[in-house]
Image (tube, rainbow, N blue to C red):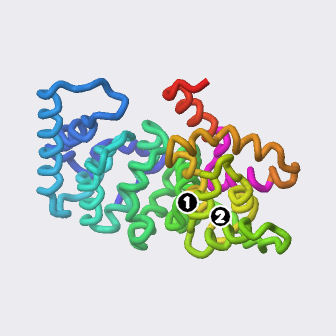
Amino acid sequence: MIMCTEETVCTEDEFGTAPPWQDELIALARNITQDDDPPRSPEEEAEELAGHQRLCEIVDSLNGKEGPAAIRSLLLAVHPIEHYEIYEAIYSHLAMYPAADFGRVAARVLPEWLETNGIHPNISDALERLTYDDRACREFTTWAGEWRSQQRELVLDAMRLWSHESQYWETVFVALGGEVTEVCLDPVPTGWPEEWRWAVELFRQDGDLQLLRWAMDQKPADYGPLLAVLELDHGPNWRGIRRVIDLFFSSRERMRLVPGFVAALEEQPRERQDRVRRSLERARPGAIEHLRARYEQFRQLEGLS
């Protein structure tokens, strides 16, 4: 097995000859209408549907014995676009190939994919096998030793984000040398109002956001339970804070609450503000800015003043 060094140029045929269907598959996987695309004619829609069917035909014809070049081709067919579950066929077939081949190809493709496309959930979904297949993960981390320093930093940035979103990526992130911050479990202050304490307990038990939804839907909205949940550290349940943030995107009425929530946060004592912001930032980096940006888009679409 030849591994690439600084003196060796890794060519595109490192894994063998590209399969004859590679270019067609890559093109078909890119031809998926996006929400902000202009309307297509009936003929164009029919052509796109036929392309989706052809994509499935190509992928379904594979049996996992085509070699590393096929894995590379499948990964290159993953684009940073909304795929409306069309890529699921690609994701499922990637699990058919030998673990060692998958890990090696993944290590070769991922840095280049990120350099070209940026961090996107589609490639993390395509590489999900690394999170549960020990052999594939070992091969991946072994071949990661050949990355340039800039590539390593780029992949670590992506893995850091993915491990924020899913605990299963933590194993891969740590194997690459990433550091995971341990989150403590704060006690619930006994002097808090009952509904605040109840909101925290429900959130910690099974991620129940029912009380938070109820409080947000009051007239006027009650941000107390929401700030209470955001203020505390929740140990292994800290990733659930992303779902709390997403409550604002669950309806038009809740989206309109973003300015009120930000104002309520800024009215809190500095120490409490810092705790809430730390919690938000841990779960979704740039969360406050993200909320404001999404609200501005919503305001413009709705014609709000």
Q: What amino acid is at disc 2?
A: Val
Q: What amino acid is at disc 1?
A: Ser
Whether residue 110 sits left or right of residue 241 in the image: it is left
> For the point 83% across and 44% down, which residue is it?
267
Dot 2: element? loop
Which label belongs to residue 163?
1
> For the point 45% across and 67% down, which residue is it?
131
Q: Which residues are magenta?
A: 275-289
> For the point 18% across and 43% down, which residue is it?
52
Whether residue 289 sits left or right of residue 80 in the image: it is right
Is residue 86 visible to us here? yes
Count of number-bearing discs: 2
Whether residue 227 sits left or right of residue 211 in the image: it is right
Residue 143 x, y percent position in the rendering: 45, 59
Query: In terms of image quadrants, where is residue 174?
Result: bottom right
Q: Are marks 1 and 2 in contact (CB under 8 Å)?
A: yes
> For the point 56% across and 64% down, which residue is it?
210
Image: 118 above or below 96: above
